[in-house]
Image (spheres, rainbow, N blue to C red):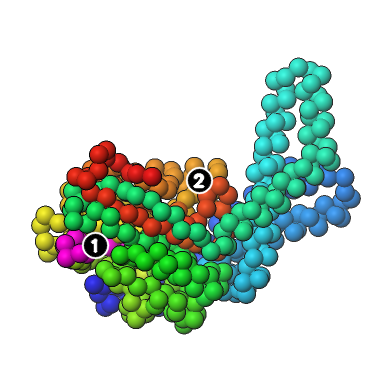
Amino acid sequence: MADRSMGGGWGSPMAERGEKSEWIVVIVMFLNFALVLAGYVFLSYVLRLPLGKAAKIGLLALAFLSAGRLMIMRQIYGGLGGIEAARWLLLVTAFAQGLIVMLFLLSLFRDAGWLLSFATGKAIGKSLRVWLNGTTASLIILALAVVLNTIGLIGAAKIPEVKRSEVVINDWPQALDGLRVAVLADMHISRFFDRDWVTGVVDRTMAEKPDMILIPGDMVDGTVELRAPDVEPLADLQAPYGVWACVGNHEYISQLKPWLPAFSDLGIHILYNAHQVVLPRGVPIIVAGLADPTGMNPRYGFPGPDLAKALEGAPEGLPVVLLDHRPGGAHNNVKDPRVKFQLSGHTHGGMMPLLSLMVKRVNGGFLKGFYDVGPLKLFVHPGVGLWAGFPIRILNPSEITLLTIKSPDLTAEGGDIG
Protein backbone atom coordinates (compact mmCIF):
# COMPACT_ATOMS: atom_id res chain seq x y z
CA MET A 1 0.00 0.00 0.00
CA ALA A 2 1.00 3.66 -0.20
CA ASP A 3 3.71 4.96 2.12
CA ARG A 4 2.17 8.00 3.75
CA SER A 5 5.51 9.27 5.02
CA MET A 6 7.09 9.74 1.60
CA GLY A 7 7.90 13.09 0.09
CA GLY A 8 7.53 16.62 1.31
CA GLY A 9 4.15 17.18 -0.30
CA TRP A 10 2.19 20.39 -0.19
CA GLY A 11 3.46 22.92 2.32
CA SER A 12 7.00 21.53 2.62
CA PRO A 13 9.84 24.10 2.47
CA MET A 14 10.73 22.75 -0.97
CA ALA A 15 7.15 23.27 -2.12
CA GLU A 16 6.91 26.77 -0.69
CA ARG A 17 10.08 27.92 -2.48
CA GLY A 18 8.78 26.81 -5.85
CA GLU A 19 5.13 27.79 -5.49
CA LYS A 20 5.43 31.52 -6.16
CA SER A 21 7.59 31.19 -9.28
CA GLU A 22 5.49 28.34 -10.63
CA TRP A 23 2.27 30.31 -10.33
CA ILE A 24 3.88 33.28 -12.05
CA VAL A 25 4.60 31.00 -15.01
CA VAL A 26 1.01 29.71 -14.94
CA ILE A 27 -0.45 33.23 -14.84
CA VAL A 28 1.74 34.39 -17.72
CA MET A 29 0.69 31.31 -19.73
CA PHE A 30 -3.01 32.02 -19.10
CA LEU A 31 -2.48 35.69 -19.93
CA ASN A 32 -0.84 34.90 -23.26
CA PHE A 33 -3.62 32.40 -24.03
CA ALA A 34 -6.24 35.08 -23.35
CA LEU A 35 -4.44 37.68 -25.45
CA VAL A 36 -4.13 35.34 -28.44
CA LEU A 37 -7.77 34.20 -28.34
CA ALA A 38 -9.28 37.61 -27.63
CA GLY A 39 -6.99 39.35 -30.12
CA TYR A 40 -7.81 36.99 -32.96
CA VAL A 41 -11.56 37.01 -32.25
CA PHE A 42 -11.46 40.82 -32.25
CA LEU A 43 -9.48 41.10 -35.49
CA SER A 44 -11.21 38.31 -37.38
CA TYR A 45 -14.75 38.48 -36.00
CA VAL A 46 -15.62 41.64 -34.07
CA LEU A 47 -14.13 44.07 -36.62
CA ARG A 48 -16.38 42.59 -39.30
CA LEU A 49 -19.54 43.38 -37.33
CA PRO A 50 -21.58 46.46 -38.33
CA LEU A 51 -21.08 48.11 -34.93
CA GLY A 52 -19.67 51.40 -33.69
CA LYS A 53 -16.19 51.83 -32.22
CA ALA A 54 -17.39 51.85 -28.59
CA ALA A 55 -19.34 48.62 -29.04
CA LYS A 56 -16.39 46.92 -30.64
CA ILE A 57 -14.06 48.00 -27.83
CA GLY A 58 -16.61 46.69 -25.33
CA LEU A 59 -16.72 43.33 -27.12
CA LEU A 60 -12.91 43.21 -27.10
CA ALA A 61 -12.94 43.68 -23.33
CA LEU A 62 -15.57 40.93 -22.91
CA ALA A 63 -13.59 38.62 -25.17
CA PHE A 64 -10.44 39.15 -23.11
CA LEU A 65 -12.28 38.61 -19.81
CA SER A 66 -13.88 35.42 -21.15
CA ALA A 67 -10.66 34.06 -22.65
CA GLY A 68 -8.81 34.95 -19.44
CA ARG A 69 -11.32 33.16 -17.22
CA LEU A 70 -8.76 30.82 -15.65
CA MET A 71 -6.38 33.61 -14.68
CA ILE A 72 -9.12 35.88 -13.34
CA MET A 73 -11.04 33.19 -11.45
CA ARG A 74 -7.89 31.89 -9.82
CA GLN A 75 -7.01 35.32 -8.50
CA ILE A 76 -10.49 35.76 -7.04
CA TYR A 77 -11.45 32.28 -5.85
CA GLY A 78 -8.20 30.32 -5.69
CA GLY A 79 -7.61 26.77 -6.79
CA LEU A 80 -6.33 25.78 -10.21
CA GLY A 81 -8.37 28.04 -12.46
CA GLY A 82 -10.72 29.33 -9.74
CA ILE A 83 -12.54 26.03 -9.29
CA GLU A 84 -13.63 26.99 -5.77
CA ALA A 85 -16.22 29.41 -7.10
CA ALA A 86 -19.92 28.52 -6.86
CA ARG A 87 -21.02 25.92 -9.40
CA TRP A 88 -23.42 28.30 -11.16
CA LEU A 89 -20.59 30.80 -11.63
CA LEU A 90 -18.28 28.08 -12.93
CA LEU A 91 -20.95 27.12 -15.47
CA VAL A 92 -21.60 30.71 -16.59
CA THR A 93 -17.94 31.61 -16.95
CA ALA A 94 -17.16 28.28 -18.61
CA PHE A 95 -19.85 29.03 -21.19
CA ALA A 96 -18.31 32.46 -21.86
CA GLN A 97 -14.85 30.95 -22.18
CA GLY A 98 -16.06 28.17 -24.46
CA LEU A 99 -17.89 30.67 -26.66
CA ILE A 100 -14.67 32.59 -27.29
CA VAL A 101 -12.85 29.36 -28.11
CA MET A 102 -15.59 28.40 -30.59
CA LEU A 103 -15.57 31.86 -32.18
CA PHE A 104 -11.80 31.59 -32.48
CA LEU A 105 -11.96 28.21 -34.24
CA LEU A 106 -14.87 29.11 -36.52
CA SER A 107 -13.19 32.41 -37.44
CA LEU A 108 -10.11 30.44 -38.40
CA PHE A 109 -12.24 28.35 -40.75
CA ARG A 110 -13.81 31.47 -42.23
CA ASP A 111 -10.40 33.02 -42.83
CA ALA A 112 -9.19 29.80 -44.42
CA GLY A 113 -12.19 29.95 -46.73
CA TRP A 114 -11.39 33.59 -47.52
CA LEU A 115 -7.85 32.64 -48.52
CA LEU A 116 -9.03 29.68 -50.59
CA SER A 117 -11.44 31.95 -52.46
CA PHE A 118 -8.47 33.40 -54.35
CA ALA A 119 -7.94 29.98 -55.94
CA THR A 120 -11.42 30.02 -57.50
CA GLY A 121 -12.70 31.94 -60.47
CA LYS A 122 -12.42 35.71 -60.19
CA ALA A 123 -16.17 36.39 -60.03
CA ILE A 124 -16.96 33.48 -57.73
CA GLY A 125 -14.00 34.26 -55.47
CA LYS A 126 -15.02 37.90 -55.12
CA SER A 127 -18.63 36.97 -54.30
CA LEU A 128 -17.44 34.43 -51.72
CA ARG A 129 -15.18 36.98 -50.03
CA VAL A 130 -17.99 39.51 -49.87
CA TRP A 131 -20.29 36.93 -48.27
CA LEU A 132 -17.66 35.73 -45.79
CA ASN A 133 -17.03 39.32 -44.69
CA GLY A 134 -20.73 40.04 -44.35
CA THR A 135 -23.15 40.12 -41.42
CA THR A 136 -24.93 36.91 -42.44
CA ALA A 137 -21.72 34.86 -42.18
CA SER A 138 -20.99 36.45 -38.81
CA LEU A 139 -24.45 35.57 -37.49
CA ILE A 140 -24.09 31.98 -38.73
CA ILE A 141 -20.72 31.71 -36.98
CA LEU A 142 -22.23 33.07 -33.75
CA ALA A 143 -25.15 30.65 -33.92
CA LEU A 144 -22.83 27.71 -34.55
CA ALA A 145 -20.56 28.81 -31.70
CA VAL A 146 -23.48 28.99 -29.26
CA VAL A 147 -24.87 25.60 -30.31
CA LEU A 148 -21.52 23.79 -30.23
CA ASN A 149 -20.54 25.39 -26.95
CA THR A 150 -23.87 24.47 -25.35
CA ILE A 151 -23.57 20.88 -26.53
CA GLY A 152 -19.99 20.74 -25.27
CA LEU A 153 -20.75 22.14 -21.82
CA ILE A 154 -23.78 19.89 -21.29
CA GLY A 155 -21.72 16.92 -22.44
CA ALA A 156 -19.01 17.75 -19.93
CA ALA A 157 -21.27 18.44 -16.95
CA LYS A 158 -23.70 15.54 -17.16
CA ILE A 159 -23.57 12.30 -15.19
CA PRO A 160 -22.11 9.80 -17.67
CA GLU A 161 -23.81 6.69 -18.93
CA VAL A 162 -22.40 3.20 -18.48
CA LYS A 163 -20.56 1.78 -21.49
CA ARG A 164 -20.03 -1.98 -21.53
CA SER A 165 -17.11 -3.52 -23.41
CA GLU A 166 -15.32 -6.84 -23.60
CA VAL A 167 -11.57 -7.23 -23.85
CA VAL A 168 -9.26 -10.23 -24.32
CA ILE A 169 -6.12 -10.15 -22.18
CA ASN A 170 -3.05 -12.25 -22.96
CA ASP A 171 -2.44 -15.08 -20.45
CA TRP A 172 -5.65 -14.26 -18.59
CA PRO A 173 -6.67 -17.29 -16.47
CA GLN A 174 -9.56 -19.31 -17.84
CA ALA A 175 -11.09 -19.41 -14.38
CA LEU A 176 -11.42 -15.61 -14.47
CA ASP A 177 -13.08 -15.46 -17.88
CA GLY A 178 -15.93 -12.98 -17.63
CA LEU A 179 -14.56 -10.98 -14.67
CA ARG A 180 -16.40 -7.64 -14.65
CA VAL A 181 -14.35 -4.55 -13.85
CA ALA A 182 -15.68 -1.00 -13.49
CA VAL A 183 -13.22 1.72 -14.53
CA LEU A 184 -13.60 5.30 -13.27
CA ALA A 185 -10.82 7.60 -14.48
CA ASP A 186 -10.64 11.36 -14.09
CA MET A 187 -13.59 12.09 -11.84
CA HIS A 188 -12.07 15.47 -10.89
CA ILE A 189 -14.47 15.88 -7.96
CA SER A 190 -14.82 19.60 -7.27
CA ARG A 191 -17.40 22.37 -6.94
CA PHE A 192 -18.21 21.65 -10.58
CA PHE A 193 -18.46 17.85 -10.21
CA ASP A 194 -20.04 18.04 -6.79
CA ARG A 195 -21.65 15.67 -4.30
CA ASP A 196 -24.86 15.19 -6.32
CA TRP A 197 -22.85 14.37 -9.44
CA VAL A 198 -20.62 11.95 -7.49
CA THR A 199 -23.69 10.25 -6.02
CA GLY A 200 -25.06 9.74 -9.54
CA VAL A 201 -21.76 8.24 -10.73
CA VAL A 202 -21.58 5.90 -7.74
CA ASP A 203 -25.21 4.80 -8.12
CA ARG A 204 -24.79 3.97 -11.80
CA THR A 205 -21.56 2.12 -11.12
CA MET A 206 -22.97 0.05 -8.28
CA ALA A 207 -26.08 -0.82 -10.31
CA GLU A 208 -23.74 -2.86 -12.55
CA LYS A 209 -22.51 -4.94 -9.56
CA PRO A 210 -18.87 -5.07 -10.74
CA ASP A 211 -16.46 -7.67 -9.38
CA MET A 212 -13.75 -5.04 -8.99
CA ILE A 213 -13.48 -1.25 -9.32
CA LEU A 214 -10.32 0.37 -10.72
CA ILE A 215 -9.60 4.11 -10.64
CA PRO A 216 -6.62 5.33 -12.74
CA GLY A 217 -6.14 8.69 -11.00
CA ASP A 218 -7.36 12.30 -10.94
CA MET A 219 -10.13 11.64 -8.47
CA VAL A 220 -10.20 15.10 -6.88
CA ASP A 221 -9.59 18.79 -7.41
CA GLY A 222 -9.20 20.56 -4.09
CA THR A 223 -8.01 19.84 -0.58
CA VAL A 224 -9.45 17.27 1.83
CA GLU A 225 -11.12 20.05 3.83
CA LEU A 226 -12.79 21.58 0.78
CA ARG A 227 -13.86 18.31 -0.85
CA ALA A 228 -14.91 16.31 2.21
CA PRO A 229 -18.69 16.58 1.58
CA ASP A 230 -18.30 15.96 -2.15
CA VAL A 231 -16.25 12.76 -1.85
CA GLU A 232 -18.40 11.12 0.84
CA PRO A 233 -20.48 9.13 -1.70
CA LEU A 234 -17.30 7.35 -2.82
CA ALA A 235 -17.57 5.29 0.36
CA ASP A 236 -20.47 3.49 -1.34
CA LEU A 237 -18.15 2.20 -4.08
CA GLN A 238 -17.81 -1.43 -3.07
CA ALA A 239 -16.87 -4.57 -4.94
CA PRO A 240 -16.14 -8.16 -3.87
CA TYR A 241 -12.49 -7.91 -4.92
CA GLY A 242 -11.81 -4.34 -3.91
CA VAL A 243 -11.62 -0.74 -5.06
CA TRP A 244 -8.08 0.02 -6.25
CA ALA A 245 -6.59 3.28 -7.48
CA CYS A 246 -3.41 5.05 -8.50
CA VAL A 247 -2.85 8.78 -8.21
CA GLY A 248 -2.96 11.26 -11.08
CA ASN A 249 -1.34 14.66 -11.48
CA HIS A 250 -4.30 16.47 -9.89
CA GLU A 251 -3.91 14.56 -6.62
CA TYR A 252 -0.56 16.31 -6.12
CA ILE A 253 -2.03 19.70 -6.94
CA SER A 254 -4.77 18.95 -4.39
CA GLN A 255 -2.28 18.16 -1.56
CA LEU A 256 -1.66 14.43 -1.89
CA LYS A 257 -0.29 13.68 1.56
CA PRO A 258 -3.55 14.23 3.52
CA TRP A 259 -5.56 12.65 0.70
CA LEU A 260 -3.85 9.27 1.14
CA PRO A 261 -5.46 8.46 4.51
CA ALA A 262 -8.69 10.13 3.37
CA PHE A 263 -8.95 7.78 0.39
CA SER A 264 -8.24 4.85 2.68
CA ASP A 265 -11.08 5.93 4.97
CA LEU A 266 -13.37 5.88 1.94
CA GLY A 267 -12.39 2.29 1.20
CA ILE A 268 -10.22 3.20 -1.80
CA HIS A 269 -6.88 1.36 -1.75
CA ILE A 270 -4.16 3.57 -3.22
CA LEU A 271 -1.31 1.72 -4.93
CA TYR A 272 1.63 4.15 -4.98
CA ASN A 273 4.41 2.26 -6.75
CA ALA A 274 2.96 -0.78 -5.04
CA HIS A 275 1.02 -3.94 -5.78
CA GLN A 276 -1.49 -6.25 -4.18
CA VAL A 277 -2.25 -9.89 -4.84
CA VAL A 278 -6.00 -10.14 -5.36
CA LEU A 279 -7.94 -13.42 -5.38
CA PRO A 280 -11.05 -13.10 -7.56
CA ARG A 281 -12.85 -16.45 -7.52
CA GLY A 282 -9.88 -17.73 -5.53
CA VAL A 283 -7.49 -17.26 -8.49
CA PRO A 284 -4.51 -14.94 -7.82
CA ILE A 285 -3.73 -11.93 -10.00
CA ILE A 286 -1.69 -8.82 -9.28
CA VAL A 287 -3.15 -5.32 -9.25
CA ALA A 288 -0.43 -2.68 -9.26
CA GLY A 289 -0.35 1.10 -9.39
CA LEU A 290 2.26 3.68 -10.35
CA ALA A 291 2.92 7.20 -9.14
CA ASP A 292 2.53 10.11 -11.55
CA PRO A 293 5.59 12.03 -12.85
CA THR A 294 4.13 15.22 -11.34
CA GLY A 295 5.28 13.98 -7.95
CA MET A 296 8.92 14.54 -8.94
CA ASN A 297 8.33 18.28 -9.20
CA PRO A 298 10.33 19.92 -6.36
CA ARG A 299 7.13 21.64 -5.34
CA TYR A 300 5.68 18.28 -4.25
CA GLY A 301 8.72 16.17 -3.41
CA PHE A 302 7.21 12.73 -4.02
CA PRO A 303 8.74 9.76 -5.84
CA GLY A 304 7.89 9.41 -9.50
CA PRO A 305 6.63 6.27 -11.26
CA ASP A 306 8.74 3.18 -10.57
CA LEU A 307 7.48 -0.07 -12.07
CA ALA A 308 10.31 -2.14 -10.60
CA LYS A 309 9.45 -0.95 -7.11
CA ALA A 310 5.73 -1.45 -7.73
CA LEU A 311 6.30 -5.12 -8.59
CA GLU A 312 9.08 -5.77 -6.10
CA GLY A 313 8.36 -9.04 -4.32
CA ALA A 314 5.38 -9.86 -6.52
CA PRO A 315 4.83 -13.60 -7.07
CA GLU A 316 6.10 -14.84 -10.41
CA GLY A 317 3.80 -16.18 -13.09
CA LEU A 318 0.77 -14.06 -12.24
CA PRO A 319 -0.77 -11.59 -14.73
CA VAL A 320 -0.40 -7.94 -13.72
CA VAL A 321 -3.19 -5.41 -14.13
CA LEU A 322 -1.45 -2.03 -13.94
CA LEU A 323 -2.96 1.34 -13.09
CA ASP A 324 -0.89 4.14 -14.64
CA HIS A 325 -2.60 7.51 -14.94
CA ARG A 326 -0.76 8.57 -18.09
CA PRO A 327 -1.15 6.22 -21.08
CA GLY A 328 2.24 7.14 -22.52
CA GLY A 329 3.83 5.05 -19.79
CA ALA A 330 2.77 1.94 -21.72
CA HIS A 331 5.83 2.33 -23.96
CA ASN A 332 7.99 1.67 -20.91
CA ASN A 333 5.69 -0.67 -19.00
CA VAL A 334 5.54 -3.15 -21.87
CA LYS A 335 9.21 -3.95 -21.20
CA ASP A 336 8.11 -5.97 -18.18
CA PRO A 337 6.43 -9.12 -19.59
CA ARG A 338 4.41 -9.56 -16.42
CA VAL A 339 2.28 -6.52 -17.24
CA LYS A 340 -0.62 -7.81 -19.33
CA PHE A 341 -3.18 -5.01 -19.01
CA GLN A 342 -2.73 -1.29 -18.36
CA LEU A 343 -5.57 1.08 -17.49
CA SER A 344 -5.00 4.81 -17.87
CA GLY A 345 -6.86 8.10 -18.13
CA HIS A 346 -5.49 11.66 -18.26
CA THR A 347 -6.47 12.47 -21.86
CA HIS A 348 -10.22 12.98 -21.27
CA GLY A 349 -10.57 11.44 -24.70
CA GLY A 350 -9.22 14.61 -26.30
CA MET A 351 -12.38 16.56 -25.32
CA MET A 352 -13.19 17.79 -28.84
CA PRO A 353 -12.05 17.53 -32.49
CA LEU A 354 -8.83 19.38 -33.33
CA LEU A 355 -7.84 19.61 -29.66
CA SER A 356 -7.79 15.81 -29.63
CA LEU A 357 -4.94 15.84 -32.16
CA MET A 358 -2.71 17.75 -29.77
CA VAL A 359 -3.82 15.65 -26.78
CA LYS A 360 -2.94 12.45 -28.64
CA ARG A 361 0.46 13.77 -29.65
CA VAL A 362 1.51 14.65 -26.10
CA ASN A 363 0.29 11.33 -24.70
CA GLY A 364 2.46 8.89 -26.58
CA GLY A 365 0.05 8.57 -29.49
CA PHE A 366 -2.83 7.40 -27.29
CA LEU A 367 -6.21 9.08 -26.97
CA LYS A 368 -9.01 6.74 -25.84
CA GLY A 369 -10.10 3.15 -26.12
CA PHE A 370 -8.05 -0.02 -26.61
CA TYR A 371 -4.51 -0.26 -27.95
CA ASP A 372 -2.08 -3.12 -28.44
CA VAL A 373 1.39 -2.12 -27.28
CA GLY A 374 3.30 -5.23 -28.17
CA PRO A 375 1.83 -7.99 -25.97
CA LEU A 376 0.43 -5.38 -23.57
CA LYS A 377 -3.23 -4.43 -23.84
CA LEU A 378 -3.82 -0.76 -23.00
CA PHE A 379 -7.18 0.80 -22.22
CA VAL A 380 -7.33 4.61 -22.13
CA HIS A 381 -10.47 5.73 -20.34
CA PRO A 382 -12.11 8.87 -21.81
CA GLY A 383 -12.94 10.13 -18.35
CA VAL A 384 -15.92 10.21 -16.03
CA GLY A 385 -15.40 13.94 -15.55
CA LEU A 386 -12.64 16.37 -16.49
CA TRP A 387 -10.88 19.45 -15.17
CA ALA A 388 -13.41 22.23 -14.61
CA GLY A 389 -10.97 24.79 -15.99
CA PHE A 390 -12.10 23.95 -19.54
CA PRO A 391 -15.21 21.76 -19.35
CA ILE A 392 -16.20 20.80 -22.86
CA ARG A 393 -16.96 17.54 -24.67
CA ILE A 394 -17.92 17.41 -28.33
CA LEU A 395 -18.22 14.04 -30.11
CA ASN A 396 -16.45 12.58 -27.08
CA PRO A 397 -18.87 11.51 -24.32
CA SER A 398 -17.78 10.82 -20.78
CA GLU A 399 -18.46 7.32 -19.55
CA ILE A 400 -18.51 4.86 -16.69
CA THR A 401 -16.83 1.83 -18.22
CA LEU A 402 -17.70 -1.75 -17.39
CA LEU A 403 -15.13 -4.13 -18.85
CA THR A 404 -15.72 -7.85 -19.11
CA ILE A 405 -12.30 -9.50 -19.29
CA LYS A 406 -12.06 -12.59 -21.47
CA SER A 407 -9.43 -15.32 -21.58
CA PRO A 408 -7.82 -15.91 -25.00
CA ASP A 409 -8.04 -19.65 -24.40
CA LEU A 410 -11.84 -19.40 -24.39
CA THR A 411 -12.09 -16.94 -27.27
CA ALA A 412 -12.06 -18.01 -30.90
CA GLU A 413 -10.29 -14.82 -32.05
CA GLY A 414 -7.95 -12.54 -30.12
CA GLY A 415 -8.31 -8.81 -29.65
CA ASP A 416 -11.10 -6.83 -28.08
CA ILE A 417 -14.70 -7.75 -28.54
CA GLY A 418 -17.74 -5.56 -28.90
Q: Which of labels 1 and 2 is toward the front?
A: 1
Q: Is residue 140 left or right of residue 372?
A: right
Query: Residue drawn at (71%, 36%), measured in percent from left and top?
Result: 110
User: Taking the image as drawn, is residue 34 in sight?
Assistant: no
Helix, strand or loop status at disc 1: strand
Relative depth, front residue between 311 and 295: 311
Q: Is residue 66 left or right of residue 218?
A: right
In this figure, which residue is indicated by the disc labeled 2? 356
Which region of the structure is painted magenta? 280-292
Query: Residue drawn at (34%, 49%), measured in percent from left and top?
Result: 166
Amino acid on which the number 2 mark rests in the picture = Ser
Q: Distance between the residues labelled 1 and 2?
A: 30 Å
Residue 104, percent from left and from top: 67, 46
Seen in the picture, residue 226 relative to 187 is either above or below; the reply is below
Image quadrant where one finds the C terminus: top left
Residue 326, percent from left and from top: 36, 55
Amino acid on which the number 1 mark rests in the picture = Val
In this figure, which residue is indicated by the disc labeled 1? 287
Query: Residue drawn at (10%, 57%), measured in percent from left and top?
Result: 316
Seen in the picture, residue 51 relative to 62 is either above or below; the reply is above
Image quadrant where one finds the N terminus: bottom left
Query: Residue drawn at (64%, 61%), measured in percent from left and top?
Result: 94
User: Reading the chain from its start, which is encountered first: label 1 or label 2?
Assistant: 1
Seen in the picture, residue 349 relative to 3 is either above or below; the reply is above
Relative depth, front residue between 207 and 379: 207
